[in-house]
Image (cartoon, rainbow, N blue to C red):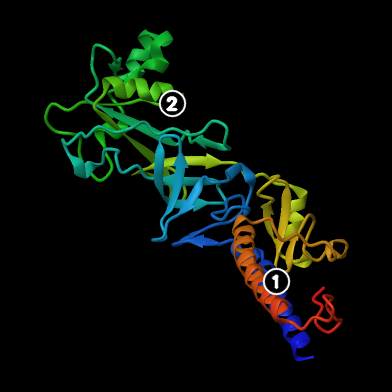
Amino acid sequence: MASTFIHRLVILLLINFLIGFTKSQSKLCRTSCGEIPINYPFGIDDGCGSPYYRHILVCSNSGELVLRTPSGQYPIKNVSYSDPHILVTDPFMWKCQDGENFRPTRPFSLDTSTHFTLSTQNDYLFFNCSQNDVIMEPKPIFCERFPEQCDSTCDSSSYLCRHLPECGSTLRGTSSCCSYYPKATESLRLMLKYCTTYTSIYWKNLGVTPPYNQIPEYGIRVDFDIPVTTRCLQCQDTTKGAGICGFDTETQNFLCLCKKGNVTTYCNDSKNSQRMSSGAVAGTATAVSVAGAFGIGAGVWYLRKVRATAPVSHGVQSNENRFF
């Protein structure tokens, strides 16, 4: 009888061990990275948020939120969900503190397959461009004379070139500055081929009455879409369980992440109470597979050891020492 009790105890411990990893799926979705809140459609844990933004935001061990793009990784200064956009910085871009030190940089780019777009509130300033390859003219006057070339002109009379943020004045010496908004990444690459460096300035909204409601700051504003679906709204509804919108990491189908597991509708839906899913979040699946495999392996090893030393009558196990 003692042997039977031990067998059952081992099996119960293994079951409880595995359930501990699968019963709180929603807790695996972190809601912040440093001081920046992480809400839908974003997620920094695989299976959380919208699959459209999968693997794009990364939270470092030091608590820094980073945007991953084809041109590199960029620290994120802020995320706004009411006016959907993120603000990123490029450490290689020129800033006023650099003065005449125009170090080489790389063109910022976005994956066109994502739901990100460069905001039209960005202004790009280019420095020390080749006059033989870049049209640098006062844009209002030049556009009146040559309207067909207006879009390809780098404005040498730009307000920002004359009022650089944090500088207090224009560049001194022989350095030149002009403003140009590239319509594509290839245009930006081409400009940097003939200019020493560049910087991006966005117009920060102060939330006050115009005309003094915006100020220029260094950085890149990237707008994003928030995919709104009925299933996600139902999942987030506090009266229906206040779940977290996520997705299956294998199929990318929608899942509502709840405290007791994952469902395809909402947490309080009685129809799903008997068929909770537990492998939607990659962190959960990995933890269960590794820890579960270890726990099961240890249990099987123990049971085999007991089986090998258990008393046997005529080569057949009795009901008291039978395991399954």
Residue 113: give x, y in percent of width and height. 57, 32
Of 79 and 142, which appears nearest the observer?
79
Please give the label number shown on residue 185: 2
In the picture, measured across the screen, residue 205 lies left or right of residue 285, that is left
State the image quarter where residue 201 is shown.
top left
Task: Residue under label 1, please give it.
Answer: 19
Does 213 appear above or below 296?
Answer: above
Instruction: Residue type at mark 2: give it.
Output: Thr
State the image quarter where residue 159 is shown.
top left
In the picture, measured across the screen, residue 240 lies left or right of residue 222, that is right
Which secondary structure lies at badge 1? helix
| Residue at the image point whose x is 51% and y is 61% from the top | 32
Residue 92: give x, y in percent of width and height. 29, 39
| Residue at the image point whose x is 54% and y is 30% from the top | 112
Using the rendered image of the protein, determine whether residue 207 is visible from the camera's viewpoint: no
Q: Earlier in the sequence, mark 2 or mark 1?
A: 1
